[in-house]
Amino acid sequence: MGKPKRKNLPDLSDLAVTGARIAVKVTPGASSNSILRSEAGLKVAVTAVPENGKATEAVRRLLAKAMGVAASRLELHQGASSRNKIFVYTAGG
């Protein structure tokens, strides 16, 4: 899996607020990585397969790239083995 190009991702920097809950619907095993924003939340497609947390980690990295933050600042709070996930942006430190 290649690194996603920033220009191909939406600007999600407005979500980089400490404590922000980010609802994500994941499509693993897609032909390309992408993020679509809607009223219901974010739809994220990743090329990674849903094995051993690979797809979840790919989603975390893709979201972080679109938000312009470090992936370590996104914490998975719900949906480790589900397509519907909730990430929380943390202050880090």
Image (cartoon, rainbow, N blue to C red):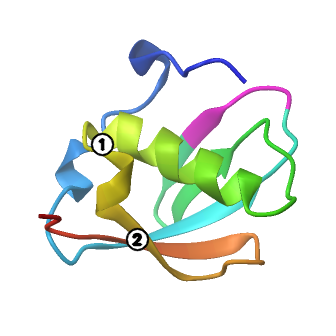
Q: Majority secondary structure of the magenta segment?
A: loop
**Left or right, 26 with reference to 74:** right
Say what secondary structure mark 2 lies in.
strand
**Residue 11 percent location from the top left of the image:** 31, 34
Residue 3 is inside the magenta segment: no
Q: Find disc 2 in the rendering and name its residue.
A: 75
**In the depicted structure, whether residue 1 falls above or below residue 21:** above
Q: Position of residue 35 (x, y in %)?
A: 56, 40
Instruction: Estimate how packed mark 1 is, as few (under 14), some (14 to 19) or many (20 or more) residues with alpha carbons within 10 Å.
Output: some
User: Where does the C terminus fall, quadrant-wise?
Assistant: bottom left
Q: Residue at x 84, y 37 (%)?
A: 30
- Residue 21 found in image quarter: bottom left
Q: Which residues are magenta?
A: 31-35
The residue indicated by pointer 1 is 67
Give the farthest residue toward the bottom: 78
Q: Amino acid at mark 2?
A: Glu
CB atoms at circles 1 and 2 under 8 Å apart?
no
